[in-house]
Image (spheres, grey):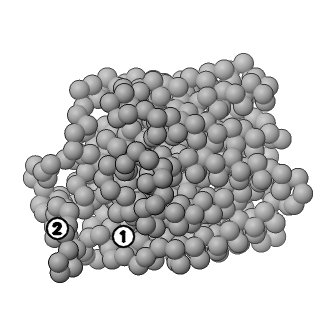
Amino acid sequence: MRSYRTLLRTPEFTPFLLSFAVSAAAQTIGGLALGTLVFRATGSPLLTAISMFGPHLAQLLGGAFLLSGADRLPPRAVLTGLCLVFAAGTAVQAVPGLPMGAVFAVVLLQGLVSSLGAGARGGLLTELLPRGGYVLGRSVYNMLWGLTQMGGFATGGALLTLLSPRQCLLLASALYLVAAVVTRLGLTARPARTTGRPSAAASRRANAVLWSSRPRRLTYLALWVPNGLVVGGNSLYIAYAPGAAGPLYACGALGMFLGDLLVGRLIPPGPRRRLLIPLRLLLAAPYLLFFLEPGVAVAAVAVTVSSVGFAAGLILQERLMAHTPDGLAGQALGLHSTGMAALQGLCAVVAGGVAQLVAPATAMTAMAVASVAVTLSLAALSRGLSGGPTTEPERGAIPVPGPTPEPGSAPGPAPVPESPAPGPASDAPASDGVPPAPPART
């Protein structure tokens, strides 16, 4: 599948995108409003970063205990329910006089439940699209996220000059309600992809299977760590340029849009794979300029160029799906998203802590240097890594029955391998019912 026209004619793909776009708009406007509210109340770069990226840390815990629900619960019900949870939580954050402790408690609770949506939305995308259409579909999904960020941050920045942060949070809550309605009415009720009851033990077993393969381990690390370090630096935009944080986030979204257009639509698969390391280096290198504390105009150009490098995630997700059995697609993508979100949240806290001691620009530069070092190290470890599809279960895996096919239907996916014994919880995939916090990247 190489045509946008064919892609958009795919049944349910358009309402899938629309529901995501509305929830993404809610996330960008609400995230900027909450970060501004916390910064005005505390003046702390660390607390501001935690308010915007704290949910990412909580996703790690959610990935350990809730992620099996991504394949074992009906996706429409999960996504609709999550939009309602975020609508309620965002409205609570807008309550006047709410203590900061309560604000952060809501932030962390939202992050905990959003890990389930990450796998549900990612797994649903693999059901809506044929196997050969995943990269193109994912690139459109990411491009929409970029466009929504541009519009959302620009709109959010403008609204904050006219309205209070609490009023903007109420607007974000209303948008989440709209997303819930679109999800409920626009998507078909589908059964769970895998039989069995969601449980912490099932989540741990599947995570252990996913982590047991060296190609998947290295792919996960490449998806999480360089990205997380750069996003940690991004969390300091408000501290670096309080009056221009919205435009800087919007420029980052523009760069992501351009990168996804380039990688998802214009570059064929062979050359695309060779761009992985250059794109990862491009993601971090422009932030080295922040050591000179450039003005907003130069910073905006650096942010735009850097964000093109986020498109490396498309290449890595394609590799991840090639090494993952069909019955674990939802949890594999959920593990990617949860691990990526957790790393982004952790790096945001680290960057905010460093910015308490040195200038925000210096902290952003340090995070970029670390990202370059990790990218080069992982490139050395991944040399010769195959991107071919998974054709048989991992050695030692135990097959688990999948959903029973309808009479007369085509054969379903291969059985899902599970580990013979529970293993340590790992991380999780891309794209929740609620998009990642700004400017997080799926």
| Residue occupying the point 37% across, 76% down | 190
Q: Is residue 401 left or right of residue 319?
A: left
Q: Position of residue 165 (x, y in %)?
A: 81, 60
Q: Position of residue 233 (x, y in %)?
A: 62, 35
Q: Nearer the viewer, residue 262 or 83?
A: 262
Question: Residue 313 lies in what quarter of the image?
Answer: top left
Question: Residue 275 lies in what quarter of the image?
Answer: top left
Q: Position of residue 140 (x, y in %)?
A: 51, 49
For marks 2 and 1, give the CA distance: 23 Å
Say which label, 2 or 1, has the lower sequence index.
Answer: 1
Amino acid at circle 2? Pro
Secondary element at tag 2? loop
| Residue occupying the point 52% across, 39% down | 261
Q: Which mark is residue 411?
A: 2
Q: Which residue is mark 1?
A: 69
| Residue occupying the point 55% across, 54% down | 436
| Residue occupying the point 35% across, 63% down | 127
